[in-house]
Amino acid sequence: MAEKKYVVHTVVISGFFLGVALFAYLLVSHHMSMSNQVMHSRDSLLSNGLSVLDRIKPVGKLAMELPTEVAVINASISTGTLTRDGAQVFDQSCAACHASGIAGAPKLGDQVQWKTRFAKGTKVLYVNALNGISSSTGVMPAKGGNASLSDAEVKAAVDYIVAKTKTN
């Protein structure tokens, strides 16, 4: 029985080393032929007769100038800012909270929720809308969270909300 184990172990170990030797032979022979393949590829690249500078030269130019027509058109645009009316500002910025009452925002048209705010006056509503307010009933970020709005647009939105709520 011991002789049989000896033979099996010897055959397994010999097979392992034979496999390692075959792998090493294939690896070395592959790398020996690589230099010929690299030279062949390199020769085909360089056989077109172009120098390195010719092969890497730019193929075009990028012009970063405005055409004269565009410059004239841009110069003719007035410096006045385009303002949106109260309804547009409300739809784009205010409706996110005031349509559904998110974060304690009084809903558009709900006279009960707006009653105490209207009692303070329109100027207070303007100040709160422009600067934001945080109270026990809710939070209002400055300009409704849209810093790109002008003061006139915010005031137009407040006027729109007041008008819509008072008519309901």
Image (cartoon, rainbow, N blue to C red):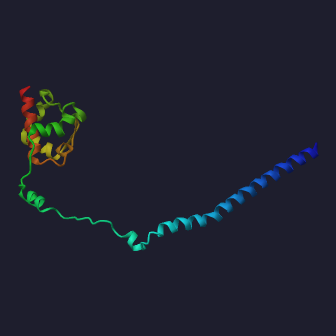
Residue 104 visible in this rendered orientation of the protein: yes
The vertical placement of 89 against 113, above or below, is: below
Q: Image quadrant for the C terminus? A: top left
Q: What residue lies at 67% left-to-right and 59% top-to-bottom?
A: 27
Name the foreground residue: 156 vs 14.
14
Name the foreground residue: 156 vs 23.
23
Q: Position of residue 119 (x, y in %)?
A: 8, 34
Q: Position of residue 89 (x, y in %)?
A: 13, 40
Residue 31 relative to residue 167: left or right: right
Q: What residue lies at 68% left-to-right and 62% top-to-bottom?
A: 29
The vertical placement of 131 against 20, above or below, is: above
Name the foreground residue: 58 vs 73.
58
Q: To which quarter of the image does residue 53 belong?
A: bottom left
Q: Position of residue 165 (x, y in %)?
A: 10, 30
Q: To which quarter of the image does residue 34 belong?
A: bottom right
Q: What residue lies at 9% left-to-right and 57% top-to-bottom?
A: 73
Residue 118 relative to residue 100: left or right: left
Name the foreground residue: 59 vs 141.
59
Question: Looking at the image, which residue sits at the far front?
Answer: 48
